[in-house]
Amino acid sequence: MSKKVKIAIAGLGNCASSIIQGLEYYKDADDDQFVPGLMHVRFGDYHISDVEVVAAFEVNERKIGKDVSEAIWEHPNCARKFADVPHLGVEVLPGPILDGVAPHMRESFHVYDESKISPVNVADVLKESGADVLINFTPVGSEEASRAYAQAALEAGVSLANGIPTFIVSDLNWAKKFKDAGIPVAGDDIKSQLGATILHRVLMKLALDRGIRVTETFQLNVGGNTDFENMKYENRLHTKRISKTQAVTSILPYEVPTRIGPSDYVEFLQDEKVCYITLKGTNFGENPLEVQLKLSVQDSPNSAGVMIDVVRGLKIARDRGLAGPIYTLSAYSFKHPPVQIPDFEAKELLERFIKGEDDKELAKPYLSQFPLE
Amino acid sequence: MMKINVAIAGVGNLAAGLVEALQFYQEHDATKHGVQYPSLGGYLLKDINIVAAFDIDARKVGKDITEAIRITLNKREPFVKDLKPLNVKVLKGPLEDGISEMTKEFIPISEESEVDIAEVLDKTNAHILIIALPTGANKAVYKYAEAAIKADVAVINATPTPLARNPVWAKKFKQAKIPYVGDDLQSKAGGTVLHKGILDALNDQGVRVINTYQLDVSGGFEGLNTLDVERRTLKRQVKEDTIRRAMPYDLNIASGTTDYLEFLGDRRIGHFYIYAKYFMDAPLKIDMRMESYDSPNGAATLVDTIRALQIARNLVMSGPINEISSYYFKQPPIILNRTRAKEQFERFINQY
């Protein structure tokens, strides 16, 4: 059993930057130390310092050819710097562009010239690098590009951690492909440590449990990084809206007027994300009740810890010879998993998975949501 | 006092607010219920008389205006419970570019034949035409303006289409000896007013604002229109510019309608944020939330504008009336800060 968790990253943006900085920042953490954002410093057999970047793919010509440790500081990345990253000896390679870059993003992303640079064969690189897990961090709306990376992972026998709301792990056909190939995967659309989705879900669950009838609810999100710039156009964020909305509406057994989504790009916010949630309802005697809250958070570090747990969870699954979606890991860590499990229970089930229990057994009561098994 | 006869093009939120307000203040004392100027040059709210209305929506055309506004306001409780019919039937106006890509699937177009606007204005003895069409309906706005000139009727341009600030039109109105005001009617107590007021106050105290935003969500069709990124970006730039011009230094501003929440109906919710530095660069943050209704907020400004424009008519003024436009519109020909605009407006009224 390899004691390392080798990861490849498709899309070296703010999320990747925060992960890479985090690996450095916490490399000497004690096993039992509390680290905000990680379930455990030692997750199963794997210490955070066992996670190692072995390959990175990009479309930004300012990042391609540089060492990962330098590329993460290139424009348009704007994630806050919280750690110095030493030279990693991993060169950023040109990945396929496909639909990863929306027409209005060509400039911001500094897309390479396809007549001068041709993309590498991702599957070959994955094999040569010995990667265990490929993280998909391409921009929201990358349907073809995400599937190209998923296909490469399939061919190379590498696990996929799908960070974006293109439905792959939660898609029956793709889930079956990975299952048949004997590869464990987790997805889709990474959840934040404490983001809008989890906060909104908890609020809805609370209303439900306390017998409040919710009459309308909405969640507005604004930010200034390229994630928000990319999602300015409605056609780019179709699946994102579904993913974010279902994560919240799935809590209630009845329908409620709801509006959820990335609402606007406010450039000067940079990597700060601001979220407003309003929930209106009625209590006893149909009397009105209203909750309003504002969440303000650095966007990309918010999911970095979760992803570092995910890649180690997938490595454990590989060690155990599991295949297909890892249900408990996906339910806890992603907004649009194959099966939704209430958050607190999902955490408990995932802890039991880490300790050695069988993922499918643990998720059994929920598996009817996803007729793969 | 003579009545002021008004016609309105576009039976949306603004028309709804006006119709309700006129009835509301027949039963309520204006001095005690939120009217800034109960009397303007001797004109009271009850002197305003709606005589004609135009729209293109099949659900509205042919109905009495008091019924037609219910379609606009389907989501909110009326401020006036039992509206008495005004016996003003909504007539089919010109469509032109009054419908955008975003709104077309929601609005059934009336198949009635289009009326001659100038003829209707003439017959109904209208003094003032209010243009309250959706943002971006430039051609339709110009068509109504043309008809008003033909019928010798003064114009209030509530839309952002350049009319008052367009020199070509200013000349036309001047030559026809007709006064008019615009562009882009400002809500009485809306987000922009509040935002500018607070920035002003901070400024006055030597606080330096670094970043600020005002992001609104609404359920009106104006909100739906903003889902079109191009239209939204344009509107946003205009709003941000007016705020930036009122500040003595540069700062980061984002301001505008940010999303459409159908179930909000006539409601509007604004989230405000200000990050500033003051003495010794100590940071200062302000978070605010404002919930309001669009139609009364617009109508509150409209009833002042109508009466003031009538005064301009009585004074035989012509062309753009800056004393009114600078105070009540977001994009007037001349932008003044609020205090100066108010002084100028009140001086204009008092001389009458």
Image (cartoon, grey):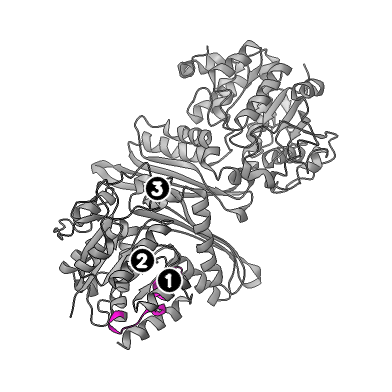
Residue B287 image position (x, y, % from top left): 49, 59
**Of residues B10 and B69, the one drawn nearer to the viewer in this rendering:** B10
Q: Secondary structure at mark 3?
A: strand
Image disc number at residue A143: none
Q: Are marks 2 and 1 in contact (CB under 8 Å)?
A: yes
- Relative image position of residue B203 (x, y in whole percent): 55, 74
Neighbourhood count class around disc 1 (C-alpha, 10 Å): few under 14, some 14–19, many 20 upward: some
Query: Are circles 3 and 1 on residues that touch, CB within 8 Å?
Result: no
Q: Who is closer to the viewer here, B90 or B15?
A: B90
Left/right placement of residue B316 relative to residue A59 reads: left
Side of A162 relative to B14 (left or right): right
Report the chain holding disc 3.
A
Looking at the image, which residue is at 65% across and 38% down? A101
Q: Which residue is mark 2?
A: B145
Q: Which residue is mark 1?
A: B169
Alpha carbon separation for disc pair 3 and 2: 46 Å
Q: Secondary structure at mark 2?
A: helix
Q: Say which chain tag 2 marks.
A: B
Q: Residues within 10 Å of mark 2 (few under 14, many from 20)?
A: many
> Residue B331 colored magenta?
yes
Between residue A326 and residue B91, name the one nearer to us: B91
Percent coordinates x, y for residue A216 in the rendering: 36, 42
Amino acid type, label 3: Val
Label 3 crowd bin: few (<14), some (14–19), many (20+), radius 10 Å: few
Marks 3 & 2 on one chain: no
The span picked out in magenta is B313-332
> Which residue in the protein does label 3 denote?
A291
